[in-house]
Image: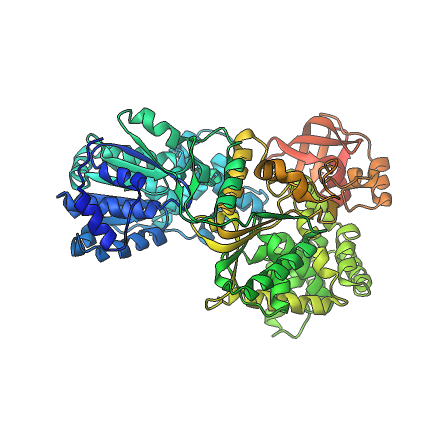
Amino acid sequence: MVPLVSSRFFYSLEQAGLSLDQEQQQAVQHLRGPLQVIAGPGSGKTRVITARTAALIAAGVNPHAILVLTFTRAAANEMKERLPNLAIIGRQARAVTMCTFHSLCYKLLEAYQGRSPAVVSQGQQRRWIQESLRRQQEDAHPDQVEELLHTISYNKNHNIDFSAVRHQRTLLARVWGDYEAAKEAARMLDYDDLLLDTYRLLREKPQLLRSLRRRWQYIMVDEFQDTNLVQYELLKLLAAPANNLCVVGDIDQAIYAWRAAEPRLLLQFQRDFPDSPQVQLTSNYRSTPPIIELAKRLIVHNKLRHPTAMQAVRQGNIAPRLFRPSDEWAEAKAVLSMLKQCQTNKIPLEEMAILYRVNSQARPLVSLLMEANIPFSLREKGLLDLDHWVIREVHAFLRLLVDPTDTTSFLQVGRRQLRLQEEASDYLYRLIRRSGGQITPWDAYQQLPREYADISRLKQLQRHLATARTLLPSSALKYYLENMGFGSYLEWAATHHGYPVDHYCNLCDDLLPDLRRFTSVRAYLNHIDRMLQALQQETAGGGVNLMTLHRAKGLEFEAVWIIGIVKGLLPHSLSQTADEIEEERRLLYVGCTRAKDYLHLLAPRSYRGEEAEESPFLAEAFGAQFASQLGPSSSGQAAPAPQRAQSAAAVAGGRYATAEQAAHSANTQPPPQAGQSVRHYHLGLGTIVSCTRQQAGGKDFHVLTIDFPARTGFKLHWELSLEMGIVDALQRS
């Protein structure tokens, strides 16, 4: 490594308030050829990139020849603000190209393809996928739409385009083809196209590639562990042949594999660039020694990583604390109590953060913060999963109890209770609109053509609603799940889309503790309306920060609480492979290293009404101190993993089916066999290809594979489908 930067340069930086330690200086001094910088949390990586850019300019490199790529506009803007303040380079810094990967690709396509790319919105992407599914008579379920969009995006980011699946007879291939055709007709690109089209443009136009290589002779990349395969191939194209490529990253903070990020590229870098030195930034300027030691004990259990020796620079001896409240509401109350104590100790609210794995975990906290009039800032726009289709349908049912004339709620509930298809819903809505709102949705339904209306179902819905109106809010929800078939539908939908059987039911369970706090449905809905209003209003500074662990990356706070550290949440129940578990561990590591002085970890003893087992990550993080941290009532034998006991009714007719319903399903239909015909309420007549007997909770159930004219290889849970009326009859062919 040849030093090209003088001590006078570093002195000038120090005078400008940008002092560097020895490791940081080492990274800044290496200006030519490839360089890998492993930057742990709080180690000053932005400072290094800023200083290295200044060093290149001070060494005589034309600022126009420097390209700095980041993964967020905020990071790019931060460096743009810092650079011009350095007197040693001054205004020259404005000529440096600092932007995100997608912004760079947009500019290149705009400049060299002769038009400004129109980028499609996420909403339009979903609509195109929904339209494709409906044309093919497939279920345009929200989660089906998201899964298909994610799969298309994931493939593109791995340099796999539609041509790779064009000739396949799969649902993905058909939908992907329709999606690409819709984009082409609208002359639009998605964000993945920006990367893929730019990569192809450079591959296909060597003269353009040579021109860009002459322009950007020095390239730096921030957060390299978040790079996907297409981005990496782009970098290698642009950097060759001089390979003046500096990448800064930390595999221990790689938490975006689900977005197609490839943390292994950081490990692969020195194989692809064998003459690249590696500089490790091991000094943590953010957290106190006890927090650093806990984080190190945790992350050392990962195999996919660079061995590092992170050390705290700051002083402090307040150890991270572990709390095991009784349930999620006790957890929220404990956090609120500690938060108030921190306020008493003069810690500003904006220096406090409550972190969680999934958005729904924040609902109890938001309720209590609202009641206590404590300002808060919700960093995600997911509205705590209140906009999830399951929660929207539950709330539509509750709103229909309060206001039977609510057309929107009637249509939403009617989709399942009355089997209202889209065409019938549109017809009903037009009837109401033509009447000037003078007729109710109930009246309008009775005016529908015979092929759309089922008056017996309408009367049954009226009886159900009349009964549910007499119940407390929590009992009304249980009635909707158990007596009106919504619970069985959720179980069927979960298995149909490849999730654990209780995946959607858990969202309803999350609502129950909040519902139990109210004696009337109207009071609960008023509370939800206030919550939605509060969530949609930005806190004008000064509020406690609520966000997911993913959103917290890159941030720091004086006091941090991480809630819900139990099996099933962290690690998440959907993370099963060794790589997925390692990413979950990295997620907790990222959360812990956000804390500067105070770190509180919480693992409720029960969650969603079930006994919860603390995450194995806690034993790793606390090491020998773990048993004493748990307290006397938790230091013995570990609790069993959360699992709802399943009765025969739950197995045969679903988690929310009654015993009578289960008996009806089991006794009135013989076991299905290959070759039998089946009529599906949506897909029509099909033939059973195979029948597999499976077991859950000690009881048998059957999974059928059925060929329909519009869809082959369709899998169906027989008992649940019978109970819900999805399958009307099975007959010998």
Q: Is residue 133 above or below residue 351?
A: above
Q: As rendered, which of 276 and 96 lies closer to the eye?
A: 276
Position of residue 471 measured from the top left corner of the image (x, y, whole percent): 81, 63
Q: Is residue 141 left or right of residue 311?
A: right
Q: As rendered, which of 510 and 663 lies closer to the eye?
A: 510
Q: Residue at x 79, y 63 (%)?
A: 472
Q: Residue 434 lies in what quarter of the image?
A: bottom right
Q: Is residue 223 above or below residue 523?
A: above
Q: Residue at x 22, y 35 (%)?
A: 244
Where is the N terminus found, in terms of image quarters? top left
Q: Is residue 466 above or below residue 284?
A: below
Q: Is residue 318 left or right of residue 61?
A: right
Q: As rendered, which of 111 and 717 lies closer to the eye?
A: 111
Position of residue 418 measured from the top left corner of the image (x, y, whole percent): 71, 55
> Residue 113, can we see it?
no
> Residue 66, can we see it?
yes
Position of residue 44 measured from the top left corner of the image (x, y, whole percent): 35, 46
Q: Is residue 693 left or right of residue 575?
A: right
Q: As rendered, which of 460 and 432 lies closer to the eye?
A: 460
